[in-house]
Image (cartoon, rainbow, N blue to C red):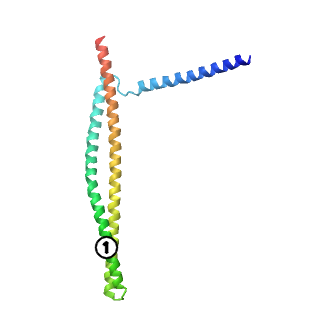
């Protein structure tokens, strides 16, 4: 009696699992069939129009990406130069400060000018670094956008193939 109940329970569990697998499979199958936006030969005009638009978008994004990549070396050089200038200005300010410690008003004014210059150079170095980071972020964004557009083009190619296959099958019959 206990063994029979155990076997019945085991069979019911197996049937439930089979039902879940069947339901999941059915959902995947119907989902992929309905996911296709363009299904008939009449839809090819719309498909081609969308394809052309996305291809144009990819070309534009590639142009922007090339420009952003070209700016990378410029920003790197600018950041390096600004950093070197900031270090030089800071050293000059430090030297002038030691001279100004003697108490001469002219020397104090010169030291103040050198300190302002060092501060400006440090700010320029910071700005150059921020520009470089923003450019890297833009490159990453553009690469992501291009990848999304290319995936959409691949999806449209699959839909076009499915339409062509369907058209060829109906013309043979």
The quadrant of the rendering that contains the N terminus is: top right
Q: Camera-side residue: 51 or 49?
A: 51
Q: Is residue 9 left or right of residue 116?
A: right
How many numbered callouts? Answer: 1
Q: Nearer the viewer, residue 128 or 153?
A: 128
106 or 102, nearer to the observer: 102
Residue 131 pos. (x, y %): 33, 58
| Residue found at x 30% / y 18% | 167
Q: Which residue is mark 1?
A: 89
Residue 16: % across, % down:
60, 22
Residue for point 62% across, 22% down: 13
Residue under the image location 29 percent in, 12 percent down: 172
Q: Position of residue 9 (x, y in %)?
A: 66, 21
Q: Is residue 107 left or right of residue 22?
A: left
Q: Using the image, determine if residue 132 lies above or below residue 120.
A: above
Q: Is 67 rendered above or below residue 84? A: above
Q: Residue 166 is drawn in which quadrant?
A: top left
Residue 50 at x, y percent in the picture: 30, 33
């Amino acid at each position: 009696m206990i063994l029979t109940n155990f076997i019945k329970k085991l069979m019911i569990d197996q049937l439930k699992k089979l039902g879940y697998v069947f339901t999941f499979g059915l959902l995947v199958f119907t989902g992929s069939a309905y996911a296709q936006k363009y299904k008939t030969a009449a839809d090819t005009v719309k498909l081609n129009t969308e394809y052309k638009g996305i291809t144009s978008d990819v070309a534009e994004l590639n142009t922007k990406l090339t420009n952003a990549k070209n700016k990378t070396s410029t920003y790197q050089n600018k950041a390096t130069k600004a950093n070197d200038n900031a270090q030089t200005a800071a050293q000059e300010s430090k030297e002038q400060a030691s001279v100004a410690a003697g108490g001469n008003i002219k020397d104090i004014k010169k030291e103040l000018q050198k300190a302002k210059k060092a501060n400006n150079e440090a700010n320029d170095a910071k700005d150059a670094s921020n520009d470089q980071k923003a450019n890297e972020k833009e490159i990453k964004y553009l690469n992501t956008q291009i990848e999304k557009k290319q995936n959409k083009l691949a999806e449209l190619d699959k839909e076009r193939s499915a339409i062509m296959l369907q058209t060829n099958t109906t013309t043979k019959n």
